Image (cartoon, rainbow, N blue to C red):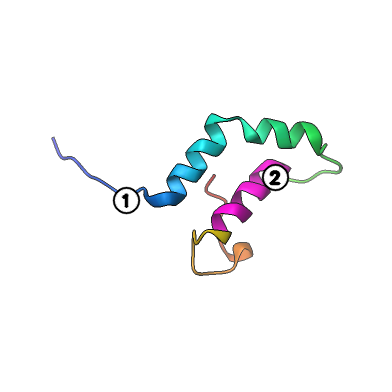
Amino acid sequence: MEIRTLPLDHLGLVAGVFDLLDIADLIDDRIPKIGNHNLEHSEIIKAMILNGLGFVGQRLYLSKMLI
């Protein structure tokens, strides 16, 4: 059995708390989806928060949504 570990750092904690507290549901309830968009508002806001905290060193529009 091979065991692999990956660093979680603070970004994984922030994403985990975001999911644990169901913040996505609160955001999507308050900001209704208008139009035919592929992403929910909560996914975009979560990506913006993680990007602002140092998720990647590139622009947000260049990264894939790994949420």
Residue drawn at x 83%, y 36% as measured from the top left: 32
Residue 58, image x, y percentages: 53, 69
Q: In this rendering, would 40 be left or right of 36?
A: left
Give the camera-side residue of 46 and 53: 53
Amino acid type at mark 2: Leu
Residue that badge 1 annotates? 7
Report the span colored magenta.
Answer: 40-51
Amino acid under disc 1: Pro
The residue under the point 82% across, 43% down is 36
Q: Position of residue 61 (x, y in %)?
A: 63, 63
Label 1: element kind: loop
On whether residue 50 falls in the magenta region, the answer is yes
Marks 2 and 1, the one that precedes in the sequence: 1
| Image location of residue 19, percent across then percent down | 55, 34
Q: Residue furthest bottom?
A: 58
Q: Quadrant of residue 22?
A: top right
The residue positioned 70% from the left and 45% from the top of the image is 39
Instruction: Work out how far the residue at label 2 is from the one at label 1, CA to CA, in angstroms.
Output: 27 Å
Residue, far right:
34
Magenta includes 17? no
Q: What secondary structure is found at the residue carrying circle 2? A: loop
Q: Which residue is located at x 36 percent, y 48 percent?
A: 8
Labelled disc at residue 39: 2
Contact (Cβ within 8 Å) of mark 2 with mark 1: no
Quarter holding the N terminus is: top left
Frontmost of labels 2 and 1 is: 1
